Amino acid sequence: MNAPGDDTARTRARRLGWKLGLAALLMVGFGFAMVPLYRVVCLRTGLNGTTDRIDAVAARATSVAADRLVTVEFVTATSANLPWEFHPDVTRMQVHPGQVVVATFHVRNLSDSRIVGQAVPSITPGEAAPHFHKIECFCFSHQALAAGEARVMPVQFVVDRDLPADVSTLTLAYTFFNLPTVRASLDSRGNDS
């Protein structure tokens, strides 16, 4: 026969176990939710040089500030484990705020195998990031290149008219990263795109 205090202790232990399990489950869920939440915060605030994406109709509706020129510089890099050649056609251009502009970049797979990469953009100075909007960009999707394949990749963008007056130059930097897990996933499905 159990003593009366034993049932109370077991009940408290069981409740504590359920509470701890629920807390652990909530922490795991919060951990998974942090990635999309962080991305939204970065897009809205320009934190970490993240730029926003707008559609072509909205970009064309923006009036052009013909009396102001802003220099946009292009910088490219690849991660150490990605054997790709990657560079812009031009390293800088002058644009009028509100003007829809296209810049092109070249990429070539220097390896003897198919590789999937992802470009990650950033803008400096940070206060310019919320005013730089990409309409179309190769960074919106994974790029799969066959062995030796080369490709020209356009970026269509617009700089807001309300870019702070003290910002006369901004830098759009791209770093390409190797995505071996994506390649393995595509290879296992027989996808060659």
Image (cartoon, rainbow, N blue to C red):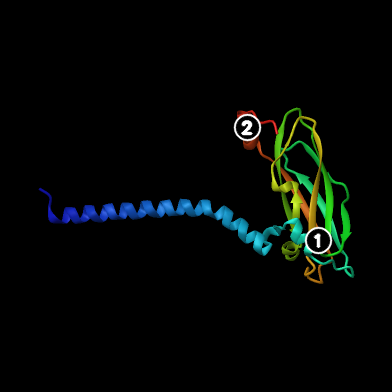
Residue type (three-letter) at the residue carrying disc 2? Ala
Which disc, if any, is residue 82? none
The quarter of the image holding the C terminus is: top right
Seen from the viewer's position, the closer of residues 182 and 98 is 98
Asked if residue 145 is positioned above or below residue 17 in the image, the reply reads: above
Left or right: where does residue 132 sit relative to residue 181? right
Q: Quadrant of residue 11?
A: bottom left
Q: Residues within 10 Å of mark 2 (few under 14, many from 20)?
A: few
For residue 12, what is the image quadrant? bottom left
Residue nearest the observer in this picture, 58 or 152: 58
User: Residue 173 at what x, y percent from top left?
Assistant: 77, 52
Classify residue 4 as left or right of residue 105.
left
Where is residue 131 shown, x and y percent of the image?
A: 75, 64
The residue shown at (13%, 56%) is 4
Q: Residue furthest bottom?
A: 165
Secondary-structure class at tag 2: helix
The percent coordinates of residue 175 (x first, y second) are 74, 47
The local crowd at label 1, few if under 14, some if 14 to 19, many if 20 or more residues have their Cα within 10 Å, is many
* Residue drawn at 42 percent across, 51 percent down: 25
Tell me the distance, in whole angstroms, between the alpha carbons under discs 2 and 1.
37 Å
Is the C-beta separation of discs 2 and 1 under 8 Å? no
Q: What residue would you read off at disc 1?
A: 170
The numbered disc on residue 184 is 2
At which x and y percent is residue 132? 76, 60
